[in-house]
Amino acid sequence: MRLKTKSGKYYQKSLREDERVVAERKAKELWYEVTSLDRKDILYTDKRFGAVFKKFLDSNNFGSTRKERMGSFYNFLLSRDDCPLRDLRVHEFNNDHWLEYLQWRTHLYSDRTKFTDAEVHSLGTVRTPARATLHSERSIIRQMLLWASKKKLLATVPNMDSVTLTLATTHNINVNHGKTRGVNPPPQLWSRIKRKLYEWAFWDMKGAYYYDRAKYNDTFSPTKKDVDNWLNCGVDIDFNPYDEETGSSENRSRAANKRFARKRLYYAIVISEATLLRPTTELSSTRWRDLEITKSSRHPDLLIPLLTTHQSKRSNDRMKEDRTRTAVGRYGSAVHFLRWRKISREYGFGEDDDFIFPRWTNKEERDSGIKQPCKFAEEGRTFSLLLQKWGLNRVATGESITLYSCRHAAISRRISAGWNLLDVATAANTSVLSISQSYAKEWAVAAADRFANTFKDGVIKIPEERRDMVIRLYDAEYGSDTRLEPSEEDIIK
């Protein structure tokens, strides 16, 4: 079958039929379809959805920061044989196919008899995808369809329903509508997590320190060279006394890149907490030249780190093109920057043009000038798997703790320290409304005395007899050991 289209190009296809009558019938059906599309100025093609998507990727007709996400989406989903979109002709795509895809996508790993939790985690995914994930995939598909429309592969871009709670319920779409960026962990739990993370990250330096403690004059400061010498000393290495906190010795890789990655994750968390930069491209895009350390005007011996990011989230003004902002770190965080730069240099990074949190490259790649930031999505996956291993991945309400929880914990500490709403919103680079809504409980706790309204001119209204009665009832119900007593620091204040 051969047909000349309005564009002057010929469309030709073998119908692969042995009988002439059947071939003629198929040819007429195909002729009608091609000419109908030709009248709409659509270039008829037998290209399937997956093939057009591949051409779209090859065109690079999108932002450079999107390519990796789009390629990952294509490889993970559209390259699968069972994907309902893969062999669909692109000009036939409509909203019904989109809903069919959502049903397939969200139930891909929901069957626990086929996939264990370990298998799902090894694939880097979850059983119930978040709504934000599906919205991201929707935007990628629409961007590809817009490109196909410009290439005259389809007449109009079809409507694709947004994933709402009503839509998910109506069409049996298994999606998580809850918060996806992690919950704010209780202070004691977060302190425990950071302690275990520290032990996990610095097991090699602790080993070198315990092996020859007198060398460091009671100062914990082994270098990479010291660690390498300890690992290669040829004697049986005793991993005690820190095995119980960091796991079995068999799980500790002695490779330099693995040891570097552990410390990178730890410092990414503490620096994100200190600066309130989001543990996303906002933090990973920073280089050492973006760091400035200045002295406090009140106390010259106090150093203040200033870190500038060029990928700041445009929370308050989405039309703003400039995404640069400078985050101010806490006084004590200067030591984290300085220690991490020292460690980075020992592993071949740490120059002004290097990323503060770089992707590991071998010496040959570094010498050739290859510099890439680490992927915080991978850092977050590592962090989540660690918490699951330690049994610290959820709070009492069942909500998950994620890498983004470090930002929640840092904002909560500032609220507890008495920061006002505007200062917190400015330091966190987000709106006042977002802070007031997301951290309403923290504000209530921080201002509990004022909200309780039991003071007048500094005098407590409640009689002392009633206070004593309340204490006795409280101790009888909860026990005196649960009562929060003022610390020495509070007493001094």
Image (tube, rainbow, N blue to C red):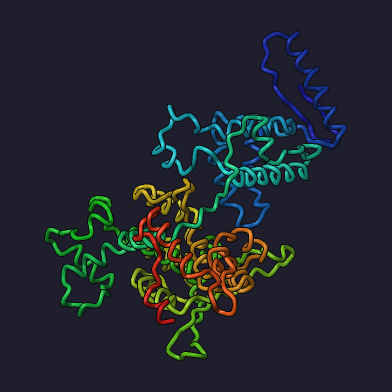
Percent from the top left, x then y, of residue 63? Answer: 65, 56
Q: Residue at x 46, y 91 (%)?
A: 300
How many labels were placed on the picture? 0
Where the N terminus falls, by quadrant? Answer: top right
**Does residue 406 sit above or below 386 in this rendering?**
below
Compared with residue 98, is residue 449 higher up or lower down, i.e. above or below? below
Is residue 182 visible in this depiction of the protein?
A: yes
Residue drawn at x 83%, y 22% as measured from the top left: 32
Nearer-the-camera pick, 135 or 329: 329
Q: Nearer the viewer, residue 431 or 249?
A: 431
In the image, 146 versus 356, the foreground residue is 356
- x then y, percent, for residue 381: 45, 51
Q: Is residue 392 left or right of residue 272?
A: left
Q: Is residue 41 above or below residue 431?
A: above
The residue lying at 56 percent from left, 68 percent from top is 447
Q: Is residue 169 above or below residue 414?
A: above
Query: Residue 375 in the image: x percent, y percent?
Result: 49, 57
| Residue extending farthest front | 465
**Residue 290 in view in this figure:** no
Quadrant showing the C terminus:
bottom left
x and y percentages locating residue 126 in the rendered image: 49, 41
- From the viewer's perspective, is 308 left or right of 362? right
Hey, which quadrant is residue 263 in on the image? bottom left
